[in-house]
Amino acid sequence: MAETATPATQDTPPPTSTRRERTGWYFYDWANSAFQTTVITVFLGPFLTSVAKVAAGCELGADCTGYVYPLGIKVAAGSYYPYLISLSVLLTVFVLPVIGAIADRSLHKKRLLAGTAFTGAGATIGMIFVTGDRYLLGGALFLVANISFGAAIVVYNSFLPQLGGPDERDAISSRGWALGYLGGGLLLALNLVAVQSFDNGTAERTLDLARWSIVSAGLWWAAFTLVPLRWLREHPTAAALAAGRGGNVLTDGFRQLGRTLREVKAYPLTLFFLLAFLVYNDGIQTVITLASQYGTEELRLEQSTLIVTILLVQFLAFGGALALGGLAARIGAWKTVLLSLVLWTGVIVAAFRLPAEAPLPFMVLGGAIGLVLGGSQALSRSLFSQLIPAGKEGEYYGFYEISDKGTSWLGPLAFGLVFQLTNSYRVGLVSLLIFFVVGFLLLLAVPMRRAIVAAGNTPPRVL
């Protein structure tokens, strides 16, 4: 790990940005996190499932099994939302790299951010019209919102390498991620207070409150996106400047994506990092996704305990992202992420040993997840920024988002198979250890300094 940068990389001046510009970038994390927390984590699944059950002929709030027929396909109402998630992931895999390629060749990247963000926010606000048995409308709006969410994240992340030099990006990424957890947690807290205050116990009122909570996330997303659109500056790449002198950004973007797919094998260490990220991040996403189910089914905890724990995770992740970002400044992001994976392994072991019907230990473990969650994700994002060839930030962050979102079925699949064989959620949880152990070993095997130099970049002072 003692490689030094080549003269070519040393001669490359670090990008410059203003404090106002970086603050604007942070605020997109604040804006879009409302969709992830309020919509995806809490309200949308039960909401769309209830609408699908009404369409299947069930009484609102009744526990019954019915079927809906989207495009003539027989689907159990309870499976409608999970199938939508799978479909959105499949479509996202095709969309994100294309969006990234277009972003790299656009002179107006902020317009692309505006288009994708406002499309997603608009589709989320459109959930106000999902009433009665309009499950198809709800499903279509969710697909548009979720795909647009991923596309906007690709464009947003592609600004990161242009906001600071190699030694600054860990702190920049950590601050953005921390602010995102704070914003998402704040809106979720406000919505949960509203639900507790105005719910009269009827299924109709519960559904209405869920709908308005989802709409509020769309309004929040759209309103706070105005800050980065105002404060960010354009940093056109050489490819964007060339494309601006002639040609079509859309068709040129497709051609460039084809060239990148052929050339990406020239950066095997970047691909190896993506493989490591794919494995350990799948473990992280599975823990987040299945924590509520584990708490409900295995630990027999009340819904109120789960809600408090979700909020605890959100607000502690704010501090955790900043704390691990500070640690990365001392020992390096690569070592800090490796340390976080050791801590994640400890979280899994502790979760296996949690007693049933004991809210306090579960909330303490949720606090531990919050402290390690934000930092491991934020520093993975900044680490990857070091491995991207100059001028291809959008494309490579498209691949990164696929690794983040497009393969998040592996962990739940392993969990589900183990549960089916053992009928034990605890044993299913232990199966997730393999993702953190293998991910740790893969990341440990990446020669980060050599990988950064191979991508044509200057390594940070400490890794």
Image: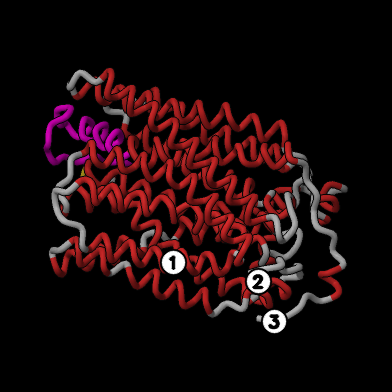
Q: Which residue is mark 3?
A: 2
For the residues labelled 2 and 1, the Cα–Cα distance comes to 27 Å
Determine crowd level at label 2: few under 14, some 14-19, many 20+ residues with C-alpha closer than 10 A. Answer: few
Q: Is 127 rendered above or below residue 442? A: above
Location of the N terminus (image quadrant): bottom right
Q: Please name the amino acid that badge 2 sits on.
A: Val
Q: 40 or 33: nearer the eye?
A: 33
Q: Residue at x 57, y 55 (%)?
A: 325
Q: Which residue is mark 2?
A: 264
Q: Residue at x 49, y 76 (%)?
A: 442
Q: Please name the amino acid that badge 3 sits on.
A: Ala
Q: Residue at x 60, y 32 (%)?
A: 225
* Residue 380 placement, left or right of 435: right
Secondary structure of the residue carrying numbered label 1: helix
Q: Please name the amino acid that badge 1 sits on.
A: Leu
Q: Earlier in the sequence, mark 2 or mark 3?
A: 3
Location of the C terminus (image quadrant): bottom right
For the residues labelled 2 and 3, the Cα–Cα distance comes to 25 Å
Q: Is residue 221 magenta?
A: no
Q: Earlier in the sequence, mark 2 or mark 1?
A: 2
Q: Position of residue 54 (x, y in %)?
A: 21, 30
For the residues labelled 1 and 3, the Cα–Cα distance comes to 24 Å
* Residue 146 placement, left or right of 237: left
Q: Which residue is mark 1?
A: 341
